[in-house]
Image (spheres, helix red, strand yellow):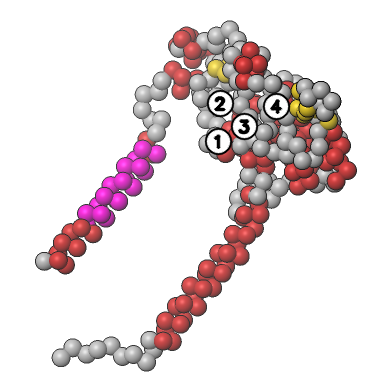
Amino acid sequence: MIRLISILAGLGFAIAALWSFGKGAYVVMTEGMGEQSAEYALHEKVRGPEGGFSFEGPVGNWDRQQLQRGYQVYKEVCSACHSLNYVAFRNLAELGYDEGQVKAEAASWQVPGIDPNTGEATSRPGLPTDKFPSPYPNSVAAAAANNNAIPPDLSLMTKARKDGSNYLYALLVGYGEPDPAKLAEYPEFETPTGLYFNKYFPNVNIAMAPPLTADGQVTYSDGTEATISQMSKDVAAFLTWTAEPTMVKRKQTGWPVLGFLLFATILAWLSKKQIWSSVKPRKED
């Protein structure tokens, strides 16, 4: 009786697991196949840059020149509105900057400080141990300067969004005008005053003005042509690094771990064969 109950319980769990798996697979396969909303009709699927990113895949690696270019785009364009509260200037050493360059970069930023003589709030050149400063003193000032929308911190943005690296790239290149035919069919999604149409943004109208507006907006020191697509790709790569700076090390560590686990599994199997080799199966009477 107990054996029968165990079998039925196991069968029930197996059926529940298969049902959950089947339901999830059905949702994934049929997602977006039904009736589309007006918002979805104007929205396009996120696409990444041509050729992808160097850090993608199980053996991907950082392109340090690209990360340095991305930092330059952030510094000259994105930092006017967005902070990097979880990144310190000294972390730039991981991008290939030497100690002197890190100190120079830190000193080129103004960070909040205290006047030692009066005790009043002031600003001072940054130190390598300082975090990247916020461009606004508080959230109220940030909202007032951005049509009542507070620009988010970008430190972990690629981890906070699905397919984050490709999403950021697509968002930066996705500004423009909606398809007139689709907009005529769904006039309620016409872009309101103060917002901007972006075909890759979830609800297609975004409060952030296009940050990259023309080729050559940034002059790269390595001679790379600074097209909007290139600048978008570079800053998306840089923000991927800020969100997960140990990603490449994690991948590099993973291969030896997998090799060890495979070796241990084979060793355990051979040990089992050796230990039980002299044991003969019991014959039934």
What label sits on residue 160 in the rendered view? 1
Most common secondary structure along the magenta stretch: helix
What residue is shown with label 3? 168
Q: Identify the residue at image location x=68%, y=29%.
A: 83
Residue 259 drawn at (x, y percent): 57, 67
- Of marks 1 and 4, which one's residue comes earlier in the chain? 4
Label 2 Cα crowd, 10 Å radius (few <14 / some 14-19 / many 20+): many
- Tell me the SS state at disc 2: loop
In contact (CB < 8 Å): disc 2 and disc 3? no
Counting residues from the N terminus, which is met first, the one under dot 1 or under dot 3?
Answer: 1
| Magenta-tinted stretch | 11-28
> Which label is found at residue 134?
4
Residue at image coords 68%, 33%: 84
SS under mark 1: helix
Q: Position of residue 140 (x, y in %)?
A: 62, 16
Which residue, given by chain and number where applicable, does mark 2 sit on?
A: 200
Q: How far is mark 2 from mark 3, CA to CA?
A: 9 Å
- Which mark sits nearer the N-terminus, 2 or 3? 3
